[in-house]
Image: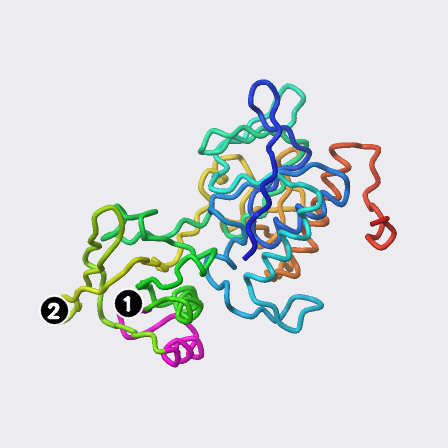
């Protein structure tokens, strides 16, 4: 996946980021919203708790083909995310990745002010929440948290960085098998460890990984990581026999899934239906200047597809534009009418 552009963040004298639209959630809908806000001439900031863009796609199935995106018979998840980032890049969106939206208040002009858990303060003309099913937090690898950032990772944004490494992937879902398949041609060795002999991943993914020569170790858990300043070995224990084994490892990918949680959003005063944000036909919530789009929303007849989220976030941004500037037109015209 291409690296996000290094866009300078402009702040006022108090350190507050000023932006027309703050998008909370850097999944497909949020990234398309960043493009659309830029297309409308609005400044945009994108905030997401994960350290990279892409939301569920990057976290759970980056290598899987997606078949229901208009105009693409099939597109890999990571390629879709890279294209969405590139589509918005000419408009210079700010990215606050690794930031959880923590607190919503309003300034004296009734403009939303959002504080992140990292202390960033963003004052926006409008907020668009596109957080999928909420905040995704990686499930930790209990035996190896002290090595996080020292060989233990949750994501593999650049597989080439692991060329020649001994790699141990922990997990049995699609993301675990995807990472194993991507790294197998590059790494010196790849082993996949899962606590049971049953996998959540698709059968085709399991067969592909086995066909690449990856050793799949089942009914086994990671009991410890060993090393000095960096991971060197992974100790695993068979769940039935108790037998232990040490595996060489320079990289340990903990692909144990993610915990979805609305987190602080549920305390903002948003109207919720079954942990989803209720919106009207404008994609407006019950809070002033706060809109929502994508899987996190709920309304009668809602269909949760990436393609639907694209349309919803365009609707949200266009309606937010008229709130920011009451003289602005709701419909900005077609992109084909704009000069390049």
- Number of marks present in the image shown: 2
Circle 1 residue:
193
Question: Which of the two residues, 318 or 219, is positioned nearer the viewer here?
Answer: 219
Circle 2 residue:
243
State the image coordinates of residue 21 (x, y, percent, origin top left).
Answer: 66, 37
Vertical position of residue 154 compared to residue 201: above or below: above
- Magenta span of residues: 189-212
Q: Say which mark, if any, is on residue 82.
A: none
Q: In which quarter of the image is residue 336?
A: bottom right
Coloring basis for residues? rainbow
Determine whether, in the image, residue 230 is placed left or right of residue 105.
left
Q: Which residue is farthest front?
A: 164
Q: In percent of the image, x 58 and y 68: which residue is there?
A: 66
202 is within the stretch colored magenta: yes
Vertical position of residue 81 compared to residue 245: above or below: above
Q: In which quarter of the image is the N terminus?
A: bottom right
Mark 2 to mark 1: distance in Å? 14 Å
State the image coordinates of residue 262 (x, y, percent, origin top left).
Answer: 47, 45
């Amino acid at each position: 996946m291409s690296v996000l552009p290094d866009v300078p963040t402009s702040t006022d004298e108090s350190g507050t980021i000023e932006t027309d639209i703050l998008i909370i959630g850097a999944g497909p809908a949020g990234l398309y919203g960043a493009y659309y806000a830029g297309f409308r001439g609005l400044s945009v900031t994108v905030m997401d708790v994960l350290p990279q863009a892409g939301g569920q796609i990057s976290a759970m199935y980056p290598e899987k083909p997606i078949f229901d995106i208009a105009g693409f018979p099939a597109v890999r998840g990571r390629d879709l995310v890279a294209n969405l980032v590139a589509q918005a890049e000419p408009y210079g969106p700010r990215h606050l990745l690794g930031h959880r939206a923590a607190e919503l208040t309003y300034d004296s002009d009734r403009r939303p002010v959002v504080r992140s858990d990292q202390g960033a303060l963003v004052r926006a003309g409008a907020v668009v929440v596109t957080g999928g099913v909420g905040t995704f937090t990686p499930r930790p690898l209990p035996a190896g948290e002290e090595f996080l950032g020292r060989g233990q990772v949750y994501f593999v944004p650049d597989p080439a960085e692991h060329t020649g490494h001994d790699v141990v992937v922990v997990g049995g879902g699609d993301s675990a098998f995807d990472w194993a398949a991507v790294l197998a041609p590059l790494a010196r060795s790849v082993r996949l460890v899962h606590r049971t002999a049953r996998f959540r991943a698709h059968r085709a993914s399991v067969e592909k990984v086995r066909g690449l020569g990856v050793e799949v170790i089942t009914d086994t858990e990671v009991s410890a990581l060993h090393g000095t300043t960096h991971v060197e070995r992974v100790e695993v224990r068979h769940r039935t026999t108790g037998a232990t084994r040490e595996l060489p490892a320079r990289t340990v990918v903990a692909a144990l899934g993610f915990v979805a949680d609305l987190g602080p959003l549920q305390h903002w005063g948003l109207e919720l239906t079954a942990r989803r944000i209720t919106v009207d036909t404008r994609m407006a919530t019950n809070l002033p200047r706060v809109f929502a789009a994508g899987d996190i929303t709920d309304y009668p007849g809602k269909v949760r597809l990436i393609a639907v989220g694209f349309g919803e976030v365009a609707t949200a941004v266009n309606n937010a534009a008229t709130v920011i500037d009451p003289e602005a037109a709701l419909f900005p015209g077609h992109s084909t009418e704009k000069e390049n």
